[in-house]
Image (tube, coloured by chain):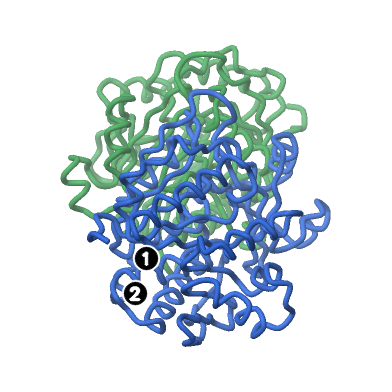
Chain colours: A green, B blue
Amino acid sequence: MTSSELDVVAIGDAIVDVIATCDDAFLDEHRLPKGSMQLLSTSAADALYAAMGPAREISGGSAANSMAGAAALGLRAAFIGQVANDQLGDIFAHDMRSLGVQFETAPLAEGPPTGRCLILVTPDAQRTMNTCPGASHELTVRALDEHLIRSAAVTFLEGYLWGPQSPRAAMLEAARMAHAAARTVAFTLSESLCIAGRREGVMGMIDSGVIDLLFGNEHEVRHLTGCGDLRDCLSALAPKVGTLVVTRGAQGAIAVANGERVEVPAAPVQNIVDTTGAGDLFAAGFIAGRCRGRDLRGCLEAGSVAAAEVISHFGARPEADLRELVSL
Amino acid sequence: MTSSELDVVAIGDAIVDVIATCDDAFLDEHRLPKGSMQLLSTSAADALYAAMGPAREISGGSAANSMAGAAALGLRAAFIGQVANDQLGDIFAHDMRSLGVQFETAPLAEGPPTGRCLILVTPDAQRTMNTCPGASHELTVRALDEHLIRSAAVTFLEGYLWGPQSPRAAMLEAARMAHAAARTVAFTLSESLCIAGRREGVMGMIDSGVIDLLFGNEHEVRHLTGCGDLRDCLSALAPKVGTLVVTRGAQGAIAVANGERVEVPAAPVQNIVDTTGAGDLFAAGFIAGRCRGRDLRGCLEAGSVAAAEVISHFGARPEADLRELVSL
């Protein structure tokens, strides 16, 4: 392994979040299970948007949020994801680059518009996500820059992109490139793996040794393993990945690596406003800790602090100076 | 005068704000006088945008913000302004309609894109605005719905739209329609009247009796009248308009009508985050007070509370329940 030029490169959805507040009755009326993520067709997204309140637009995308956090923590980060040649695509690209995240994926010349995610935030700070992935799901292996991937210590892959065939193939190819350069491959589970047939595919990838570092929340690892008890989930998954990280919301987080198991409490938050991006920023903090040589506990602690910052305001990207909050 | 179907209709810029934080050094480096508004060409806007940090997009526009506030205060409000047929135009239209503001101006089929305003907020909560007006300045008299204007108790015109010839003609025509139906015409001054030649035009309009209700901040009325002393400004302007309202930031606000002069302090704000929209929301509160039959002091107080809410967060549109804060 040569020394890395980049700390981390991520492959994920390139999406702009459209964030509005609503009450529980609105979710009920539109049959949206609170806290869930669903994929919407363009017409369903248009109908939901028309019914929603006034919104603010903030760039999002799960792995993209993690890269925003990684850059805010001082990592050299890059992102690969597909936008269209439109205003939301320009906004997404600007927001990545202005954070210092290298983002060179050429916009699609034609086809669907840049993806958006209609996020409804209820007064209890829960987010319910309604994604219209648009151009984001048109990502292909042609978007991969092999030199970039080989030069990054960690290649970070997003579970939301596992569903569509062509981005999935791109992620698997990126993992192959990374392993050929003896780099670490990380994967973050997502709720979308609950959609029929995906669980087996993700489990197959993990079984075949593609993933060195796996992130998921309690719900996701339960669904993936089929185990009801969290300890059973950890026992089932940990031997298959170098490092397993499970976030538990207000109950903190657990990591298991090489038989060692460490648990940390959630970092305190004065006022939780919008939980969107908590997992994404946790991953950013953890990876930053790892790239800076912290031990398992130090990585978990960095993840907790980064997650706590992002849930204290609307939007899934850090607003405070994360380097000041997380000393790495 | 027949009873009104609408409380207020506004004509103004249809713009999406692109809001980022920055430090004083960034303003210096880009030669942007803090607290000012400048118009940018597309290429200058692109260059500034590329240099800015990550942003959030929230619909804006001075008079449009006032209508958002008016609707939030329970008024029946409408807006006339020009967007393009693009994603930012869709965002602007959605945000107006989702607030209950009637907005029917057809998007431009071709020409410049929807306008945006690059807003830089410094740690002292001052906003420095850099407007790329785009489609907004393509407004023509064809966008006026005479029935709508005749049906509104107040027609509210925006000073930023006074510069370009075609929107100015549309505003003057709207004023004529409103007066023909014995309605009130309101005008809000803007910093852009400092641009060469505009002051005289605005003063001429005021002299000819077009304006029944004039809003401005201290700086704007000083520039308009050429008087250094605020009392002289009031004496010069008040006799020419039915009601004169002058906002003074942290020092509160003054109104003069029919020889009566009332002054109120600024409403308290716990944490001032972003002063964008303070004047717009002050006008919304004042007009709401007037439409609900409040006296001069009551109107000023409603304006102060609405302004205090909007400066407590990013973005120039209310987030809290204004009806709860301002009892009308």
Name the residue rendered at 60%, 80% in the picture. Answer: B234
Query: Is A232 displayed left or right of B123 in the figure?
Result: left
Q: Chain of mark 1?
A: B
Name the residue rendered at 21%, 48% in the picture. Answer: A26
Can residue A97 be seen at all in this image of the molecule?
yes
Quadrant of the drawing holding the N terminus of chain B: bottom left
| Marks 2 and 1 close (CB-CB < 8 Å) | yes
Q: Chain of mark 2?
A: B
Vertical placement of residue A99 versus A42, above or below: below
Q: Nearer the viewer, mark 2 or mark 1?
A: 2
Query: Is B295 displayed left or right of B108 in the figure?
Result: left
The tag on residue B178 is none
- Residue occupied by mark 2: B325
Name the residue rendered at 55%, 17% in the picture. Answer: A108
Q: Which element carries disc 2, helix, strand or loop?
A: helix
- Quarter of image, res A9: top right
Q: Which element carries disc 1, helix, strand or loop?
A: loop
- Residue occupied by mark 1: B320
